[in-house]
Image: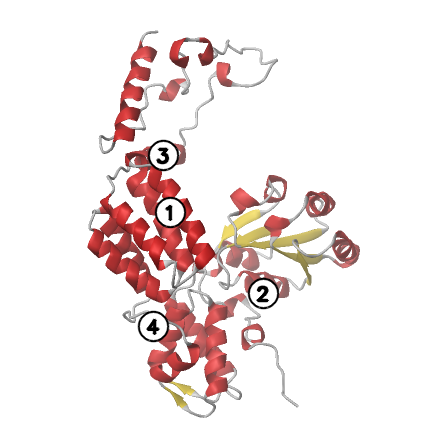
Amino acid sequence: MMDIKRPLAYRARPKSIDDIVGQEHLIGEKGVIRRMVTNNKMFSMILYGPPGIGKTTIAEAIGELFGLNVFKFNASTDKKAHLSEIIKVSLNYGALVIIDEIHRMNKDIQDFLLPHVEEGNILIIGLTTNNPYHSVNPAVRSRTHVLKLNPISNENIITRLKQVSKDFKEELTSTLEEGVYDYIAQSSNHEIRAGINSLEILHMSFPNEIVTLEMAKEILLTPSLSLDKNEDNYFNILSAMQKSIRGSDVDAALHYLARLIAMEDLPSILRRLTVIAYEDIGLANPSVITKMDACTRACERVGFPEARIPLGLLVVDMALSPKSNSAYLAIDKALEDIHRGLTPKVPNHLINVSNFEDKAKYIYPHDYKDALIYQQYLPDELKDKVYFKGLQTGKYERALNERNKLIKQVLRKK
């Protein structure tokens, strides 16, 4: 009978935060989780970041370190009755509940859970690949600390692969050439789990053999990144494509797109092109944003190899389009002020409180010609601040500039 074991990635999961690679900003000497452990103080939290980078591992290691009863709850599939049973146990013994896909928690379960979190009956660690500031209910978020996990570097993946090879040497009997570790890391898309899965497949395929790079490529069937043995190389190519589009070099943009297509990582290409549409083309040609959305739908519908066709069309259009970063610069200037603490009081007439004692009259612009009438919107301390400075790169932005001038003229006539 075939010997069936749990996947190596599951069995090799670190039991202690000391064995976890990456996430130095959280578990390093000055990291908040490290300090939490050192000071023996536990708090509820949400861990978010891409798949396979250690969210579950960190959550389970925390439970182990604090000697807690650890329960798992999946917010998208588990029912309230399951959570009720966990709570009953927790009231007597205390527990940590690891909530996977916490962004999918429905209101009924949330209303049942949160009083117990607030009263300290249980601790929770929510896990999600989505940004919790956008996807997790504020009531849940306000009772937790949100901690972001970063993508794992290739160097850290290689370190972990070698650790696993050493810890499981009795079953991992092959010898991998050094270049094979690099290849696995480059092919794993910054997921430790994916890297360990590839490691296990190679050892199963070539027991007691020396595994060369060519042998690894034949088994893993991962497109060769063609690419240097440099962990930043993939992101350098994404960056090179963006800079080529920004610089209006259509041929260079197509070259780097082709290299990315060869890696078949469609989500990363689409994410980067979306950023380019808003950051580099922006108001000079906003129709590109609509084309970007259409391209995304088409690529997701047909997949590779056909997705190369809409991608090529879009990149040519983007590279030859007029460019503007005025909106991107404007929001960054506004955020810079916020981060410097410039958040003065909102003018009274803009506050929607009917019984506000000192509330000035709000002027409804639609009652006036062109919906324009002077009224101060910025706080007094920032009333003369200018964030947006339009460019003259395309018809649409030129029209916006003219409109902005008209508005300024009307507002000057107090």
| Residue 135 can be seen in this image | yes
Q: Quadrant of the N terminus?
A: bottom right
The dot on residue 331 is 3
Which residue, given by chain and number where applicable, does mark 2 sit on? 61
Q: CA distance from mark 3 to mark 1?
A: 17 Å
Residue type at numbered disc 3: Ile
Q: Is residue 349 depicted above or below 106 in this figure? A: above
Residue 180 percent coordinates (x, y): 37, 79
Residue type at numbered disc 4: Ser
The dot on residue 274 is 1
Question: What residue lies at 41% left-to-right and 73% top-to-bottom?
Answer: 159
Q: Are marks 1 and 4 in contact (CB under 8 Å)?
A: no
Residue type at numbered disc 2: Ala
Q: CA distance from mark 2 to mark 4?
A: 35 Å
**Which comes sooner in the sequence, label 1 or label 2?**
2
**Which comes sooner in the sequence, label 1 or label 4?**
4
Mark 4: few/some/many CA within 10 Å (<14, 14-19, 20+): few
**Which comes sooner in the sequence, label 3 or label 4?**
4
Q: CA distance from mark 2 to mark 3?
A: 40 Å
Identify which residue, 378 or 92, lies in the foreground: 378
In the structure shown, which secondary structural element does the residue marked by tag 3 occupy?
helix
**For discs 3 and 4, the disc positioned in front in the rendered view:** 4
Mark 2: few/some/many CA within 10 Å (<14, 14-19, 20+): some
